[in-house]
Image (cartoon, helix red, strand yellow):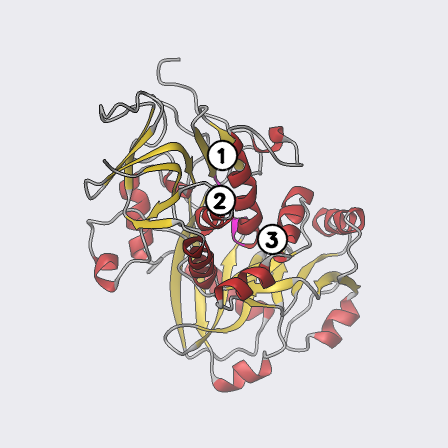
Amino acid sequence: MSTLYDICIVGAGMVGSAAAKWLSREPGIKVCLLGPQEPTPEEWRSEKRNVFSSYYDEGRITRELDPNITWATLAQRSIQEYDNIERESGIQFYEEVGCLFIDEEARENIKSTIENAEEMNLDTYEHLSTDELRKKYPYMRIGDGWQGLLNFKNAGHISPRRLVAAQQKVAEAGGCDVVVDIAVTVTDGESEGDGRGGDVVMIQCESGRKIQAKKALLCTGAFTNCHRLLPGDKQVDFYPCQSLVLKLELTEEDVKNLSAMPCILCTAPGLESYILPPIQYPDGKYYLKLGGWSRGVQINDLAEIGAWFRSQGENHEGVESLHQKIMSLIPGLNPVSMATACCVSSPTPTDHLFCDMITPRLGAAVCMVGRGAKSSDEIGRMAARMIAKGSWDYDLPAEYFKLRYRPSKSE
């Protein structure tokens, strides 16, 4: 007889791995984390694999400040746990280099961020005028009338790749089984005729493996509407979008000149982008990474999403626009080479993630609207509490995160 888990988490990215860590700390709960690992070079080239994740990277921005107070709260709580995760796992993934918000004077993005910081009683930021920006960051071309907010503490960048490794290491130490496979069917209430009745969730894997659990939590990101993970003809109300990244390989001189650079979130008109300071990647080279804020092209099914991941953004029409933005903001750069990368964002109608029960035994924490990396530990905690109880069990209102579904085909 196969193992009957108390909870199976489907999806082993940042949120799923965090949820597994939190659940592994609960006494008497047998937990399974199911998902693929980072692709091998052969898998990147093969069309046989279509399921990927967005954590295959060394740099994501993290910070307490945010124009949306819900996201600011989730981020603050996650950041407070970074030290604990690093200590328990022995894996370092966080660099506190600060995060600089730049925009034109008195625009709503800056104002709402300040209001949220004041409401949260944060004293970890300073407000910078145009002259102060130019003095503090001489390598940047600061426009007239720009202002900045520097989140100088509890802000910087994380390695999502190492964060996932850390969370899974802690989860396994707590007794969680990590199963490397891909779920293709999740069926609530079906058994294998072994006398357990209709009180289990059955997960059918791509390899043919079957996993049984009393409850299951979907942390399946952009792939939530793919395969057969939801009951009946349900489809979550979101549409995955292409997200393109440009990485500039830096000279030793540029790395040295930008050694004190914070992460940057620029929302000045025409230059909307996020920029990470020099980060060393597994190939030993240092890259300056940037991406745009605009919502990318929708990709609607498993084959399209898989093809986008495998493309790594090569020859994408948005590359030149990103290149022009970075050279406008930091005009003295002399990059050795340029490379692209890509992932998928999952915007929702509410601008919040979805964290909700689908049935009494099946829950979901999905659709991070491009903001989930920095907050993934707290989102995982929120989802873990929910699935363990079978209902909402968190101090933020449940309606913020309530699942929405696309209209049924029968409607």
Rendered position, 102 above or below 407: below
Q: What stretch is highlighted in magenta?
A: 366-373
- Mark 1 lies on residue: 387
For image coordinates 43% across by 27% down, the residue present is 361
Estimate how packed mark 3 is, as few (under 14), some (14 to 19) or many (20 or more) residues with alpha carbons within 10 Å. Answer: many
- Mark 3 lies on residue: 78
Q: What amino acid is found at the position of numbered circle 3 in the picture?
A: Ser
* Image coords of residue 220 (percent x, y): 40, 41
For the residues labelled 2 and 3, the Cα–Cα distance comes to 16 Å
Tell me, yes or no, whether the two marked residues, 2 and 1, touch with CB atoms within 8 Å.
Answer: yes
The answer, for residue 74, to whether it is visible in the render is yes
Q: Along the polypeptide, which appears first: circle 1 or circle 3?
A: 3
For image coordinates 41% across by 78% down, the residue present is 285
| SS for dot 2 | helix
Q: Quadrant of the C terminus?
A: top left
For the residues labelled 1 and 3, the Cα–Cα distance comes to 19 Å
The dot on residue 23 is 2
Estimate how packed mark 2 is, as few (under 14), some (14 to 19) or many (20 or more) residues with alpha carbons within 10 Å. Answer: many
